[in-house]
Image (tube, helix red, strand yellow):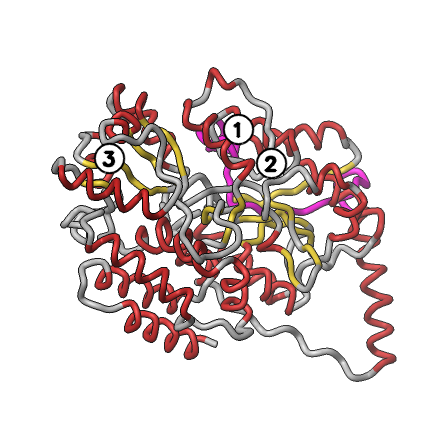
Amino acid sequence: MKKKLLAALMTAALAASMTACGAPQAVNEDNNSKDTEQAEEQKGQDSGEEAKEGTGGKTTITAICHQSRSNIGEGGFTTGFFGALDTWQEEHPDVEVKVEEMDQTAYQTKINSLGASGDLPDLFMMKGSWTKTFVDNGWVADITAELDADQDWKNAYIKGGFDAAVRDGKTYGVPQESMSTGMVYYNSDMWKEIGYETFPETWDELLDAVDKFKEKGITPFVMGNKPNWPAESCWLSTLGDRFTGPDWTQSILDGSGAKFTDEAFVKALTAFQDLAQRGAFNEDINSIDDTEQNTVYFNKKAAAIVNGTWFIPTIDNSAPEDVKAATKLAILPSVEGGAEDQKTVSGGPAWFMSLSSKVTDPAKRELAMDLLKALTDERQANVTASMGGVTAWADPEYDTAKVPALFNEYNEMIKNITAVPIYDACMDASVIETMNVGLQSLLIGEKTPEELAEEIQTEQELAQ
C-alpha cells in the first residue's frame, strides 16, 4: 500500500503500521468488592471534576491526532479536520478543547503507551486493526447507542465503513478518511483498440484482453512489486475476496476456522499466478518499484495499472495530457464460482475517531460525542472532498469542476461497491511478510500456489 497515502488513506506503509503495535496487558481487576465500589465512586467523582476543569471553569475535552496544523491547505483531510474542530470550538465557547498533534509514526507508538498506562485522552484516532486490543483492554468506549440514536449520521458512510471498528456487534469508532487499494486505472483508448469499449467485466474477458495486448507487444498491466506490497495490497486483497468472500477473511482475523490452505484462497493464488504466466505483467515485475511503474503506464508501454486512490492526484499532476484524458477507473472482473458479492474492492477507512472509556460523566460524554460527530460528519467530509481527498462519507458535497475528473468518477463508482479488508491493514505483520515475499516468487513461477498457501498458514499458526 502506498506509504505516502492521504493521511489515513488507508496511512504509512499501512501494512506494517497497522500491525506493528502490540496488545499491552489489561490491568487486573481488584478482587475486593468494597475496594472496587470505592474505586468506581472515586472514578465518577474524578470524571465529574475533570469535566469542569479548564480555563475559567470551562469544561475540558482532550484529544490526540496524527495531523498537524502546519499542514493545513496541503491535504484535504487535515484541512477538513482542523476546520471542523475550530468551527465546533467557536460554537461551544464554554468548552476548552486541548489537542495534541504529532506525526503518524510518533502517534502509533504513543497511543498504545497511553492506553497501557490508562492515560488516553477523551478522543483519539484508532486504527481498525487495533480494535480488538483496545476493546479487550477496556480502553475504548462503546458508542453504539449514540449512533443508533442518530440514524442519519450512522447511515451516511460508505458500505462497510464501520466494519473494522465493530466487535461483537458493538461499534467503537466512526470512520474518517477512506481509501481503496485495488482500483484498476486503464487507458481507455488502448483498450478500445483491442475491441473493449469498457473494462472487462468477467475474468474470461480479461484473459482474452491479455492475449490481444500481448499480440500487439503491449504489457497489459504494469506492476512495480520490488517493495513487495503491491501484489498483495493492491491485487490479492481484492482478487482473494473474489474467491473467498469477506466472511473467510474475518474468520482468518478471528482465528475461527478459516485457513490459508482453504480451496478458495488457493484458487485465488492460482488465478493470480495464471495471469502472470499468461503474460499479463511486465517481466521486471520484482525489479521496479511502485514509482517506476507509473512511468511505464504514462509512456503507454502498459495498458493498465492496479493501484490505490492515492494514484488519482499522481495522474492529475504527472501524466501526459492524452494519458490523463484517456484514463478511466474500474474494478477487477468477476470470477466464476467465487463469492456471492463480486462488486468489491479492498479498502475502506483505516482510521476511526473513538471515545475513551474513561469518559463516564454523562454531560461530558454528550459534549465529547458531539465533537466526535463534528470531526467525522459532512462538515469535515465536504472540505476533505473539495480538496480531492477520499472521505468515508458516502455523498460529500464539493465543486466537481475544481477536483480531478478521476476523483469525481471514483466517488460515483464507490457508492455501489463494497469495501473489503486490505490484507496488510488487518493481518499479522509476520503473516503479511511471508505472503508478500511469497507472492514475488509465485508471480515468476518459483513457487506453487499450494506451497505459498502452506507457508502463509504455517506463519498464521505461529502468530496466533
Disc 3 residue crowd, few under 14, some 14–19, many 20+, Cα 10 Å: many
Q: Position of residue 106 (x, y in %)?
A: 46, 53
Q: Residue 47 carries which label?
A: none
Question: Which segment is the magenta one?
Answer: 53-79
| Residue 437 higher or lower than 238, as above or below | below
Query: Quick check: 449 left or right of 102?
Result: left
Q: Where is residue 90 in the image (x, y as percent from the top left)?
A: 72, 27
Q: Which residue is drawn at 81% across and 45% down?
A: 149
Query: Quick check: 406 left or right of 194?
Result: right
SS for tag 1? helix
Q: Label 2: which residue?
A: 393
- Asked if the residue at tag 1 contacts the one at tag 3, i.e. Cβ–Cβ closer than 8 Å, the answer is no
- Asked if the residue at tag 1 contacts the one at tag 2, i.e. Cβ–Cβ closer than 8 Å, the answer is yes
Q: Which residue is drawn at 45% across and 63% down?
A: 427
For marks 3 and 1 on the same chain, the one whose residue lies earlier in the sequence: 3
Disc 2 residue crowd, few under 14, some 14–19, many 20+, Cα 10 Å: many
Q: Distance between the residues labelled 2 and 1?
A: 9 Å
- Residue type at mark 1: give it: Ala
SS for tag 3? strand
- Asked if the residue at tag 3 contacts the one at tag 2, i.e. Cβ–Cβ closer than 8 Å, the answer is no
Query: Which image quadrant is residue 266 in?
Result: bottom left
SS for tag 2? loop
Residue that extends furthest to the bottom in the rendered view of this protein: 31
Q: How far apart are marks 3 and 1 (CA)?
A: 28 Å
Q: Where is residue 392 in the image (x, y as percent from the top left)?
A: 57, 39
Q: How far apart are marks 2 and 3 (CA)?
A: 31 Å
For marks 2 and 1 on the same chain, the one whose residue lies earlier in the sequence: 1
Q: Which mark is residue 303?
A: 3
For marks 2 and 3 on the same chain, the one whose residue lies earlier in the sequence: 3
Q: Residue at x 52, y 47 (%)?
A: 419
- Residue type at mark 3: give it: Ala
Numbered disc in front, either 3 or 1: 3
